[in-house]
Image (tube, rainbow, N blue to C red):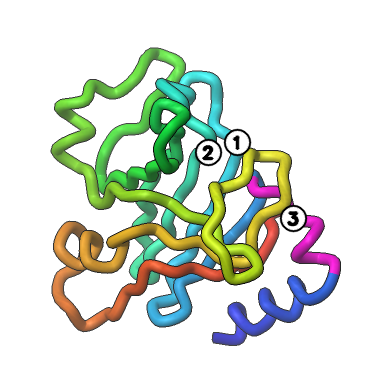
Amino acid sequence: MIRLAAGLLALSGSAAAACPMSLAIYTEPQSGFELRFRVAQPWEQIGMVDHAMELALTDGRVLWGLVAQNMGVSRQEGTLYAGCPRHSQDGPVPNEVLDACQAWQGVVYALKDGRIAPVPYAGEEAPPSLVLADLGRQLRYSVMEGPEVEIWDQLDLTACAE
């Protein structure tokens, strides 16, 4: 809780405006999970990938994932994987392997000035909040051991990586 409060204080004023999407760290306020964004490596840019991300769970596990465009006419989609190898310079992980360890897939929205917007590109300003559609329910059934942790779909910008 102290870490979250410190992050919120650090982001007050111009610090939040100065954080690019590629360095943004979001926190889910009920569970404390952190979603960290970074620029995708060339070997991760399969299809129309905009961002690489990691979701750090409070038990120490880290899920990895990507946010991608969907043919330029639809909403950006995110996917998180648990216990799955990552794409590497040696090549992408086959889809059948990824399908077996998919923990969440859904639309990702930015929230700015109370309005839904697309997730910004890597160098653009990170929005104050993100909504990852159906994140809580899917994680509860894919990686959590029970409903004891309430997980919501909205995450707030709490820090900017250095």
| Residue type pointed to by label 3 | Cys
| Residue type pointed to by label 2 | His
Residue at figure coordinates x 15%, y 70% from the top left? 145
Mark 3, secondary structure of its residue: loop
- Crowd rating for badge 3 (residues with CA inside 10 Å; few <14, some 14–19, many 20+): many
- Crowd rating for badge 2 (residues with CA inside 10 Å; few <14, some 14–19, many 20+): many
Q: Is residue 161 left or right of residue 66?
A: right
C-beta proximity under 8 Å, tags 3 and 1: no
* Residue corresponding to mark 2: 51
- In whole angstroms, how far apart are the C-alphas of marks 2 and 3? 15 Å
| Above or below, comparing residue 15 to residue 51 in the picture | below
| Residue type pointed to by label 1 | Val
Q: State whether the magenta stretch is mostly helix, strand or loop.
A: helix
The earlier-in-sequence mark between 1 and 2 is 1
The residues colored magenta run: 14-21
**Looking at the picture, how far across and down is residue 48, in whole percent?**
46, 25
